[in-house]
Image (cartoon, helix red, strand yellow):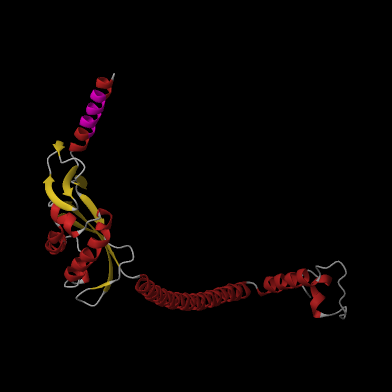
Amino acid sequence: MNKSIIGGFFLLVIAVIGYGSLFTVNMTQQAIVLQFGDARKTVTEPGLHFKLPFVQNVIYIDKRILNLDSPVNNDPIISSDQKQLVVDAFARYQIVDPLKFYQSIPDPRNVTSRLQPIFTSALRNVVGEETLETIVSKDRSALMQRIEETFNKAAGTFGLKVVDVRIRRVDLPVANSRAIFSRMETARRQEAALFRAQGAEAAQRIRSKADRDVTVLLAEANRDGQKTRGEGDATRNKIFADAYNKDPEFFAFYRSMLAYEKSLNGESTTMVVSPDSEFFRYFASSTGR
């Protein structure tokens, strides 16, 4: 019984020692073996590895390519043509020297706060040398390459390698955007007012021309009408004169008949004339005598 207990105890001790001596590193990790806080070795290959039990411990560092965004409340960057710009960019980096990284940033949770100022400085140094037209142009790969190289030099001291830098967008500050929008709105209002004034002027010119054309047309029509009426009256008078000269007696009779028709066409016509008036001469005789 005592031998079984002792054997079990030794097996337990061996298991604990074995468990404390082994550690695994997966494909996305790399490890640093520490002994009393001092780095003893770096493990970059995945698999099962050994360490001294109880006196050594292991910290794991990410091996994947990581993202770093520019600060959300980033201050505007002044370009070479004195334009204030808010640049939204991001970088991709990888920890290539885990020992140097651990010595520079013992707590990996602080890596973002340590790298963002360096990234912002690289953005300012490179973007500040370019004009707004160059920054917002389609062919700005050279600009991003320069930012990557500048950032890479500073990040190398942390055991990092910057693999890519990209600029998402470049905007003007909110205050500048509002001022520019206000100026654009004012310019558009002035342009609209100018267009409306030009339209009103053109409309007035068209109306004036139309009124003048109407006046001219009416005057010409009235002139032509007066001329036609005059010619008609002249023709009528000539016809009457010719008819009178041919048969004055019949013409006098015809005129009297027309006068009777016009003056005696009412139901209660009253005329005060002498019975022997010249007007009624055809009432007494068909010859008018």
174 displayed left or right of 37? right
- Horizontal and vertical percent for residue 169? 27, 61
User: Extreme top residue here?
Assistant: 1
6 displayed left or right of 185? left
- Horizontal and vertical percent for residue 62? 21, 47
Q: In this view, does 197 lie above or below 99?
A: below
The answer to whether residue 23 is seen in the rendering is no
What's the residue at 14%, 51% (across, down)? 39
- Horizontal and vertical percent for residue 200? 45, 76
- Horizontal and vertical percent for residue 158? 16, 59
**As rendered, which of 187 and 180 lies closer to the eye?**
180
The answer to whether residue 158 is seen in the rendering is yes
Q: Is the magenta stretch mostly helix, strand or loop?
A: helix
What's the residue at 33%, 62% (across, down)? 72
Q: In this view, does 168 lie above or below 51?
A: below
Residue 151 picture quarter: bottom left
Q: Where are the magenta residues, as a range?
A: 6-16
**As rendered, which of 221 and 24 lies closer to the eye?**
24
